[in-house]
């Protein structure tokens, strides 16, 4: 039999924030590799458009309108996804929001709580419900699963005026390591991805800023913005059997910016 670890047929992948940006880049690669796809997004129009694009790859697709900052919505959506698809093998907690402030001392409590609710609470609830499902499956004789969180290089860089965002992206790293250790006995792996400067809706303002491109993007050794499809390969690897012994790790995908 040929070695085919990246064949994802029979697996189901759930991607939060999967209707655009990095999440959709992951979802497309996963679908092209044969995985059935569940996407969560809060915008119904973007969900519909993403669903249409993903269906073209010949896989089953379920698009759910979910606000990950709502605990009850996450619990219900995970239950519905498992019922509809039969199982969930891979979960990418990718939904996030970037909301800064003119300065740290001007940051409002409202901004802080909004960012925490999506970027940290949302990840917690998503992974908690995924772990329940994967643990139950393992106890029934079907172990395995892979969890991935989209963190950010801001977790390790200084992020002026974006301390709330950076705080959430740093906080998910020990969460991932703890899950990796605790759920390894059930065959579940947990890893983190740290994107650098990626061309998505979140960075739209900076993309058109000549000064930012001259001073920041010019320092990226790859000399360009990252693109959503740059995350397809890592998603397929982490969802596949090729990574079956790879857990508790962080993958920096930033074109070399962090080390330069």
Image: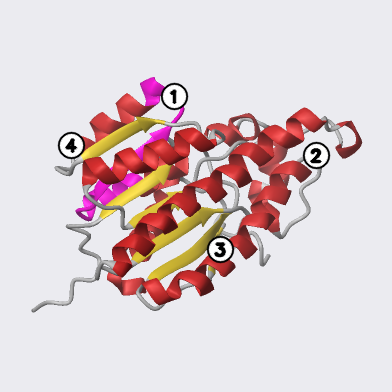
Residue 106 image-quadrant placement: top right
User: x%, y% of residue 34?
Assistant: 19, 53
Query: Disc 1 versus disc 2: distance between alpha carbons?
Result: 27 Å
Query: Disc 1 versus disc 4: distance between alpha carbons?
Result: 21 Å
Which mark is in front, 3 or 1? 3
Q: Earlier in the sequence, mark 4 or mark 3?
A: 4
The residue that mark 4 highlights is: 56
Q: Which label was assigned to residue 176?
A: 3
The residue that mark 2 highlights is: 161
Q: Earlier in the sequence, mark 3 or mark 2?
A: 2
Label 2 Cα neighbours within 10 Å, binned few <14 / some 14-19 / many ≥20: some
Secondary element under disc 1, as helix, strand or loop, is: loop
Which mark is in front, 1 or 2? 1
Residue 79 image-quadrant placement: top left
User: x%, y% of residue 80?
Assistant: 31, 38
Secondary element under disc 4, as helix, strand or loop, is: loop
Query: Disc 4 versus disc 3: distance between alpha carbons?
Result: 33 Å
User: x%, y% of residue 130?
Assistant: 41, 53
Q: Could you tell me if the residues under marks 3 and 1 are in contact, i.e. CB atoms within 8 Å? A: no
Placement of the N terminus among the 4 image quadrants: bottom left
Q: Which label was assigned to residue 43?
A: 1
Residue 38 image-quadrant placement: top left
Task: Please state if 189 lies on the left or on the right of 97 as rendered.
Answer: left
Task: Please state if 190 lies on the left or on the right of 90 as rendered.
Answer: right
Q: Could you tell me if the residues under marks 3 and 2 are in contact, i.e. CB atoms within 8 Å? A: no
């Amino acid at each position: 039999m040929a070695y085919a670890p990246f064949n994802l047929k029979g697996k189901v992948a759930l991607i939060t924030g999967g209707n655009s940006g990095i999440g959709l880049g992951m979802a497309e690669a996963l679908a092209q590799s044969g995985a059935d796809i569940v996407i969560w997004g809060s915008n119904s129009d973007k969900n519909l458009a993403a669903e249409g694009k993903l269906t073209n790859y010949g896989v089953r697709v379920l698009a759910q309108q979910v606000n990950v900052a709502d605990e009850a919505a996450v619990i219900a959506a995970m239950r519905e996804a498992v019922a509809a698809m039969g199982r969930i093998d891979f979960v990418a907690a990718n939904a996030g929001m970037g909301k800064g402030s003119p300065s740290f001392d001007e940051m409002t409590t409202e901004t802080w709580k909004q960012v925490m609710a999506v970027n940290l609470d949302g990840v917690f609830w998503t992974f908690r419900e995924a772990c329940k499902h994967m643990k139950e499956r393992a106890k029934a004789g079907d172990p395995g699963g892979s969890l991935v969180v989209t963190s950010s290089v801001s977790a390790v860089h200084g992020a002026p005026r974006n301390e709330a965002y950076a705080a959430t992206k740093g906080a998910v790293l020990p969460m991932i390591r703890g899950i990796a250790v605790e759920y390894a006995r059930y065959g579940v792996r947990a890893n983190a991805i740290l994107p650098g400067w990626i061309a998505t809706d979140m960075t739209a303002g900076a993309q058109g800023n000549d000064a930012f491109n001259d001073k920041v993007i010019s320092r990226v050794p790859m000399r360009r913005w990252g693109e959503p499809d740059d995350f397809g390969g890592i998603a397929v690897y982490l969802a596949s059997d090729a990574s079956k012994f790879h857990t508790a790790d962080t993958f920096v995908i930033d074109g070399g910016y962090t080390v330069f």
